[in-house]
Image (cartoon, rainbow, N blue to C red):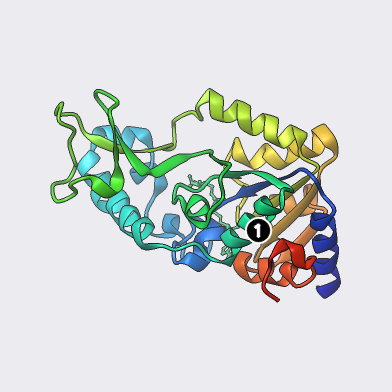
């Protein structure tokens, strides 16, 4: 394993155009549970019953009470971990250009990353389902569920529910980033939800990008597309990679 980590560190240190694709796993060490796998949110509740756009439209109170309120409270207190911080170091060094995240928790930005594509939107904002007015989640009055806009419409999180499409500008920019990078770090995603799951394949097909995957469990990508699979937790693995990086990258050794 140490040799593999060293190889990954060398590849990262020598790359000039890196992109990262992150998923729920990168925030697990920040106390936010993943969706799938052990302790996953979808183990407790059925996503089709609570995270589908039709469920939200038909019964917003149920979806707010069961899913959104809990997520909003977790996201509000969570702090970035060493996985998020490691990506900030790579961006400051100039080699990591863009993070494409499936997460709606805002932790990459909280850590200091500046170019983050929120592929599935964000929990930081609510949007009125009637007039589309936006309001910061932190400032919304959640004492009455569902929260309402001054127009009387119901606020929803400004993120993608099952049954909704990814906005075309987000898709286009993600496609551009992935087809230009020479290395893609794939961290903490089960790589099962499309179209995000095919982003590493886009990178590979376009430039022959090297795929470095960090995850405690193998995923469908591991066999198929990953060139280096580092089995472990995001924060822990980022620190282990950091030990082999030149000191200019600013990893504490
Ligand atoms: N570090 C890194 N990876 C981890 C860690 C950790 N500490 N803990 C768990 N993981 C891995 C799991 O092994 C799993 O492969 O993170 C992955 C989490 O998978 P999912 O919960 O499926 O998260 P993600 O891939 O982001 O899901 C995609 O599905 O439900 C939708 O909209 C939701 O954006 C989400 C999308």
Could you say which quadrant of the image residue 78 lies in? Answer: bottom left
Residue located 65% across and 58% down the image: 89
Image quadrant in which the C terminus is located: bottom right
From the viewer's perspective, tell me whether residue 29 is left or right of residue 125.
right
Quarter residue 10 falls in: bottom right
Q: Position of residue 33 (x, y in %)?
A: 45, 62
Question: Where does label 1 land, which residue?
Answer: 89
Determine the secondary structure under disc 1.
Answer: helix
Judge by depth and name the residue closer to the eye, 3 or 98. Answer: 98
Q: In which quarter of the image is the N terminus?
A: bottom right
Q: Where is residue 4 in the image (x, y as percent from the top left)?
A: 83, 67
Depicted 70 relative to depicted 194: above or below? below
Residue at the spot 84% in from the left edge and 56% down from the top edge = 11
| Picture layout, residue 185 above or below residue 162 | below
Estimate the x, y position of residue 151 in percent, counting from the top left.
Answer: 15, 26
Q: From the top left corner, tell me how far across and down residue 8 is, in percent.
A: 81, 61
Q: State left or right for residue 170 relative to residue 244.
A: left
Quadrant of residue 99 in the image? top right
Note whether 91 is above or below 178 in the view shown: below
Total numbered labels placed on residues in the image: 1
Q: In which quarter of the image is ligand 1?
A: bottom right
Tell me if the residue at label 1 has its CB under 8 Å from ligand 1: no
- Residue found at x 61% / y 67%: 235
Mark 1, residues whose alpha carbon is within 10 Å: few (<14), some, or many (≥20)?
Answer: many
């Amino acid at each position: 394993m140490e040799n593999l980590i060293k190889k990954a560190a060398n590849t990262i240190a020598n790359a000039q155009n890196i992109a990262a694709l992150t998923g729920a796993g990168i925030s697990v060490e920040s106390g936010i549970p993943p969706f799938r796998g052990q302790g996953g949110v979808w183990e407790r509740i059925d996503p089709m019953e609570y995270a589908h756009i039709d469920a939200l439209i038909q019964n917003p109170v149920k979806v707010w009470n069961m899913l959104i309120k809990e997520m909003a409270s977790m996201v509000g207190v969570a702090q970035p971990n060493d996985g998020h911080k490691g990506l900030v170091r790579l961006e400051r060094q100039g080699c990591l250009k863009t993070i494409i995240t499936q997460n709606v928790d805002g932790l990459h930005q909280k850590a200091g990353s500046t170019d983050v594509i929120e592929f599935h939107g964000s929990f930081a904002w609510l949007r009125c389902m009637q007039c589309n007015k936006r309001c910061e989640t932190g400032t919304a009055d959640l004492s009455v569920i569902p929260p309402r806009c001054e127009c009387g419409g119901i606020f929803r999180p400004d993120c993608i529910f099952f049954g909704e499409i990814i906005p075309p500008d987000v898709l286009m920019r993600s496609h551009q980033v992935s087809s230009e990078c020479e290395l893609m770090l794939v961290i903490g995603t089960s790589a099962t939800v499309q179209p995000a799951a095919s982003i590493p394949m886009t990178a590979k097909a376009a430039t022959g990008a090297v795929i470095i995957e960090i995850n405690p469990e193998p995923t469908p990508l591991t066999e198929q597309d990953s060139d280096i699979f580092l089995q472990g937790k995001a924060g822990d693995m980022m620190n282990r990679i950091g030990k082999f990086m030149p000191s200019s990258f600013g990893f504490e050794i």
